[in-house]
Each structure stands twice: as structure tokens, then as C-alpha cells.
Amino acid sequence: MGNLHSVASALEHVGAAEVVVGHEPQAILDADRVVFPGVGGIRDCMEAIRRLGCDQLLDQVLNVDRKPVLAICVGMQALMSHSEENGGVACLDVLPGQVTFFGEAHQSDGGERLKVPHMGWNAVRPTKGHPLWHGIEPNTRFYFVHSYHVVPDSEAIVAGTFDYGLKGCAALAQENLFATQFHPEKSHTAGLTLLKNFLDWDGTCS
Amino acid sequence: MMTLAKRIIPCLDVDQGRVVKGVNFVGIRDAGDPVEIARRYNEEGADEITFLDITASHEQRDTTAHTVEQIAREVFIPLTVGGGIRSLQDIRTMLNAGADKVSINTAAIHEPELVSDAAARFGSQCIVVAIDVKRVSASHDAPRYELFTHGGRKPTGIEAVEWAIKMAALGAGELLLTSMDRDGTRDGFELVITRAITDAVDIPVIASGGVGTLQHLADGVTEGGADAVLAASIFHFGEYTVGEAKAFMADRGITMRL
């Protein structure tokens, strides 16, 4: 889905030896680490994931091979149990939780009108120490663009939050999986730092 | 409070792969090279970059796609490409080249379904609808703005606010509003229509056309209610850096990414 090349360019920029873009099973199984990006609507995205067998590959990579995995934006949303988008779509249920709409007439706590999509640079507050946050100060701004946001069943997997009329989930972390709602590949130096951290990550949370 | 920042978007007018409006930076070797200029804006802290492809012929668009490709390889902020986008294939070409968003202008007027088709196919997040308006009411009448095409020469009779609402309903993720009365004048944004449209739609609005001072940029946000401000010449001629513009706006209480 969508613009996979920007993620590849950004990873190459921070020193990835080789980035393969695609859904070729062997390439994914041969990789040292896997990025699961996504833009666009969730229905098309999930349809493609299932049609191409990426759901099974992801399971293999995450749970059997235990490689470091980074999911981005719709990639993160696809990991949840269910999304409200496109009239309701069952997702991968890798991380239990829902993907919900910001809502019509979305407002800040102070009653200020907030546009949807949530588009632009928002401050991210890491809520737990994690190797992917290395060198990134609290409240560093990352680039977001989304109308739906993730609500995990368990607070324990939340790795970072943003404020946009609600406390939104900016990042999730569970074992060898890290997921961001923002686009590190479009977030200038902060995003490149996170991607570099991902390349250096051994997949453990210590 | 830490929340979403207002955005500053430098705009490059590109013809056959070269930036055409004057660019005058100290330390830039080639003032026509969009890659070098984009790199400069990126270093200065631009929040996004917009490319307006003003190439006359369709065949030469490959050059633009190639330029976008080169920029996307080293500039890691969002890139919007507009100008001459007429079909889903045009959109796909630009997204594949590395654009994050495409801006649809005249084609949305001739074929509004292009907006809904594109949003369904690629997602609203990458579909910007560009709205070029002029004030058509006399100065003592209630303000009325209509859409114009061909650089403001050709009227369409379409009322601007209604059109903005319709485009948002069709799935546009963002609107790029340009006042053709103000474009190139350096008199500041047309704030009346900017405010009317930002109030009428839920999606973000970029104000464009007429920036001559840093105060104009701040006014676009505080008076016009814009979510982002776009400017070309005040940055091209090296009068102000993007960083200076952001500091000025932040000093006036506007949330910026500094």
C-alpha cells in the first residue's frame, strides 16, 4: 500500500545495508528485520495483507523467528483486533484493541475545534523507556496523518502518547515489535533517529 | 500546551524540472535546481515542501517525477506535488516517485469524481484539492468568492465555500486555498475567504497567495484560521529563512515545530 519507497529511502539514509521492498516471502524470511508500513484505507490494506499471505509471514517473523519488526501508521492499525474504518474491518489481532475514528466535530479539552485528519507535527511523549526512543527527547515532534487512532486493550503496551483532544497512542511496544502511528520516514531528524535506532535494535525491550 | 503545530510550507514552481520563479540564496550554486533548494528548505526546518509543476506539456512530466524521486531520496519531510494532475494514473506516478500528497486543481472542477476515486484508491491523506479563488462581489456588497482556472483568468461561477464543503465530502484530506487576487502582490493572504473556508470544513486548510511579510504568515493562522501557510517568494529571495518565520510566529503565541 502507498508510499513504501520513502521508508526504504529513509532506512538507506541511516545506513541500512540493503532494503528490499515487497511481499516476496523468501525476502522477508531472509531479512534481519522487517518494516510493516501502510497508508490508505484499512479495507484494501487488510485485503492485500491476506491475499499476499503477509499475515502468516508476519506471524512467522514475529513469533517464530522473533525478528525486530517496526509497524508504521496503517501498518500499526492493521495489527489491532478491529478497525471502525470503511464500515468496520477485522484486523490481524496481533495486539488486542480497537482502531476508532477521532469523531465528528472533534474538540480540544478547551473547546477549540480540531481538524480531522490529525495532520502535521505533534509532540510525542514516550511513556516507557525503549531502545527505539534512544536520543529522542520527550515532546519531540513527529509527522502524523490519520483520521483513526489506536486504543489498545492493555495500557501496558503503550510506548508513547500524543495530545489531540484526547490522549492518543503514538507508539506501541511488545517484545520484538514496535509500532508508530506517526511517520518516522517523514519526521526529519527525529524520525531518522528512530529509524537508526530500529536498525541497531536487537528486538529486546531492555 | 503541546499540541499539533501550525505548518510552514515553502512552495517551488517547477517547469521541466527547473525552479522558475527567482531564487536567490546565498550559498546555493544553482538557483534553478529544485533538489538543492528543497534540501535548503529542509535544513531550515520547513514542515513540508510543495512542488507546483507548471510544465505546459504532458510529456515533460516525466522530468517532474524524476525530480520528485531525487528529492524524496534525501528530504525526509512530506512532499506535495501539484499541477497538471488529471487522472488516477498521474497520481500513482507521483506517489510512486516519492510524493506523499498530490494536489488536484482544475481536474476536480471538470471531474469531481476524480477526488472521490483517488481518496478511495490512495487514501484521503494524500489527496489535496487546490482551490483558486477571486472575489467577485463589489466592495460594498457581502463578499462572494468564486473559483477561477487558468491562473485566475477563467471564471467558473462556482462559489468557493460550497465547493470546499463538497471537496471535503468527496474525500479530500486537505485544501490548498489560493487567492488569485493576492497571488504575487505581497499584500498578505485574503483572510475573509480563508476564515470562511477553515470554519466551514473539518479538514485542514493551507492558506496561499500574497505573502510579503512574516506578519502575513502569522495573520493567516490567527485571523484566517489556517492550519498551514504556504509561501514562495519571501523564502526564495532569501529575505527570510523558514527558521526566522517560525520563530516570529512562535513569538506570537502560535504553536510551531522549532
Image: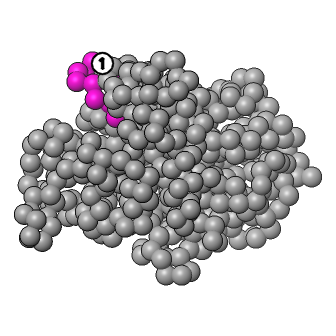
Q: Position of residue A67 (x, y in %)?
A: 81, 40
Please check the rendered image and state whether residue B57 is part of the magenta-colored stretch, yes or no.
Answer: yes
One can see residue B226 in this view: no
Furthest-bottom residue in view? A110
Q: Quadrant of residue B145?
A: bottom left
Q: Residue B204, position in %: x, y?
A: 41, 59
Q: Is residue A158 left or right of residue B87?
A: right
- In the figure, residue A95 lies in which quadrant? bottom right
Residue at point 29%, 35% (across, down)? B83
Q: Position of residue A7 (x, y in %)?
A: 61, 36
Locate residue A63, reporting x and y percent.
80, 47
Disc 1: host chain:
B
Give left or right: position of B212 versus B45.
Answer: left
Coloration of the structure image:
one colour
Q: Nearer the viewer, residue A37 or B6?
A: B6
Vertical side of B44 occupied by B6: above or below = below
**In terms of depth relative to the viewer, which is nearer, A84 or B92?**
B92
Q: Amino acid at mark 1?
A: Gln
Magenta segment boundaries in residue numbering: B50-61
**Quick one: B228 or A59, which is closer to the camera?**
B228
Locate residue A160: give its quadrant. Answer: bottom right
Q: Secondary structure at mark 1?
A: helix
Q: Circle 1 sits on which residue? A: B60
Indicate yes or no whether the magenta region holds residue B106.
Answer: no
User: Pointer 1: residues within 10 angstroms few (<14), some, or many (20+)?
Assistant: few
How many tags in the picture?
1
Q: Residue at x 42, y 34 (%)?
A: B236
- In the rendered structure, the answer to whether residue B8 lies left or right of residue A189 reads left
Q: Is residue A154 left or right of residue B86?
A: right
- The residue positioned 52% from the left and 44% from the top of the image is B242
